[in-house]
Amino acid sequence: MPQILFVDDEPNVLQGLQRMLRPMRQEWEMEFTDGGAQALAKLSEHSFDIVVSDMRMPKMDGNQLLTEVMRRHPQVVRIILSGHSDQEVILKSVGVAHQYLSKPCDPETLKTTVARAIALRDLMANVSLKGLVSQMRSLPCLPSLYVELVNELKKSDPSIKVVGEIISKDVAMTAKILQLVNSAFFGVCRRVSSPAEATSLLGLDIVRSLVLSIQVFSEFDQASVPGMPLEQLWQHSLKVGQYAKQIARAEGQDRRNTDDAFMAGVLHDTGKLILAANFSDSYNRAISRSKERQESLAAVETQLFGASHGEVGAYLLGLWGFSHALIEAVAFHHHPNHSPYGGFSVLTAVHVANAFAHSESSSNELAHPTSSLDAEYIANLKLMDRIPQWQEACK
């Protein structure tokens, strides 16, 4: 069974959690401890999948505890459950917590968050890769955009509109900003899918602290992976997001699904950033081998790393609390038939959008889908006749 450790310095809170989660005893093995030092001792003696910690604790606070957990046990999922939502607390935990829940937390929210974290365990078999992804505080950014963002924030009167526009142009910044604004700490009553809107909601003070003080964004070393131009990757990602949104609209999907389709399209190649930034030599070999053998990059990645960029990206976005529909679309955008769901979904929109984007002619007009489109999957959904309408919607 999944092993979960709850940490809080208040005995009443721990007792409340035990009562609330009693029905889950048949599905989870849970331990409850009243301090950071005790939690680390338990972690050294026993293997846990998830640690759920309060933020404000004497001697060792939640940030210090989770920092040590990340260093000593990187594969463990780290969740903050705290009643304190001031800016200082949020910013301290940005780098070490995968998700944030606020007290009081209703049972269903807590159960769903933990259950989804447990479900991620089976997404990647490579344990060392899981550990590496779990330690990531952020994703590497396009250097020119990073410099542009820093320069804007250092102005005496920076523009929140300009800052939002810069963040919207970068996959890495977009992912991190959306993770934060949609966390429970900010109490936004609806899901935010626009990075520009997310920037506005967070405000300049928090964004400035993230970039200049905490340095949550880092620059991508383009020279280390010359075969993967980051600007091209972003242009492709944005195009896939736009196409996926139009395809979802053409199928009459609601606002939630069209927003998820857009964001899943924008973030579908996040795993490439992770692999390129952390395994530059191996990833250069993967790119070269893919070209030499005329084999898909995803297949070569699986041979070299034990997982494709889709699975790697989905694992990180799942840790960060993105929606199940988005995670599924990112994980299976090359192999949609791996999904058990049998109807049109966000995954369908992203898979088709990605195929369209890859098959565009040099004149930027959509060509007929190439082999990157899984025709058998589309046929099983009885949607082959919709392809011309989707192409028209994407023009």
Image: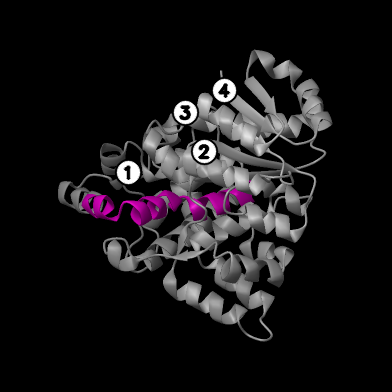
Q: Whole-percent x and y of residue 201?
A: 73, 63
The residue wearing badge 4 is 2
**Is residue 273 in the magenta section?**
yes
Mark 4 crowd level (few <14, some 14–19, many ≥20, 10 Å Cα): some
Residue at the image position 39 percent from the left and 61 percent from the top: 233
Q: Quadrant of the N terminus?
A: top right
Against 231, residue 268 (above or below) is above
Residue at the image position 49 percent from the left and 30 percent from the top: 121
Contact flag, marks 2 and 1 (Cβ < 8 Å): no
- Residue 369 is marked as none
- Residue 298 is marked as 1
Task: Give the SS element for disc 1.
Answer: helix
Question: Outermost residue toward the top?
Answer: 26
Magenta-tinted stretch:
257-285
Left or right: 164, with 22 as reference point: left
Mark 4 or 3, which is nearer the eye?
4
Say if residue 33 shows up in the picture: yes
For marks 4 and 3 on the same chain, the one whose residue lies earlier in the sequence: 4
For marks 2 and 3 on the same chain, the one whose residue lies earlier in the sequence: 3
Residue at the image position 68 percent from the left and 31 percent from the top: 6
The residue wearing badge 2 is 328
**Is residue 204 in the magenta section?**
no
Contact flag, marks 1 and 4 (Cβ < 8 Å): no
Q: Whole-percent x and y of residue 219?
A: 43, 67
